[in-house]
Image (cartoon, helix red, strand yellow):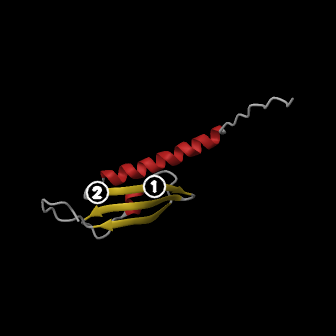
Amino acid sequence: MSAPKSKVETTVPPRHVSLVDAAHEMEREVQRRLKAQPGIEIKSLVVRRTPDGVCLEGRIETQEQDVDLRGLMAGIPGLNEVINHLVVCCPWPRTGRDEP
């Protein structure tokens, strides 16, 4: 007869939980700021936390030649670096037909 298996419980230390919450809040704030920016339409967006900031991946459409992401993200606590892997496209002109 084998010994009964003990139940193993794992808990996340409170400090780790607060770091996860802070990282998630930073990602949400980056998304909020991009979505609120006039002239930018987000087609897809992934925000990943890095040790010093965030990495942005996805596709946005804008008529602007240069999008100042660092300026847009200025003041977000803990965000010292923005790694930009976004594909920036000009929107297709509206023709009444489906876009190619």
Residue 47 image label = 1
**Which quarter shows the N terminus?**
top right
Mark 1–mark 2 contact, CB under 8 Å? no
Q: Residue furthest left?
A: 96
Which residue type carries mark 2? Glu
Looking at marks 1 and 2 on the same chain, the residue that comes earlier in the sequence is marked by: 2
Question: Which picture quadrant has residue 70?
Answer: bottom left
Q: Residue at x 12, y 59 (%)?
A: 96
Question: Is 6 left, or right, of 54 in this rendering?
Answer: right
**Which quarter shows the C terminus?**
bottom left
Q: Residue at x 51, y 58 (%)?
A: 53
Is label 2 in a helix, a strand or a loop?
A: strand
Name above or below for residue 11 compared with residue 99: above
Residue 58: image x %, image y %? 39, 61
Question: Is 98 left, or right, of 34 in this rendering?
Answer: left
Name above or below for residue 1 compared with residue 83: above
Q: Nearer the viewer, residue 32 or 41?
A: 41
Question: Is 19 left, or right, of 8 in this rendering?
Answer: left
Residue holding disc 2: 41
Q: Residues within 10 Å of mark 1 (few under 14, many from 20)?
A: some
Is label 1 in a helix, a strand or a loop?
A: strand
Residue 38 image label = none
Q: Residues within 10 Å of mark 2 (few under 14, many from 20)?
A: some
Which residue type carries mark 1? Val
Q: Nearer the viewer, residue 50 or 100?
A: 100
Q: Residue furthest right?
A: 1
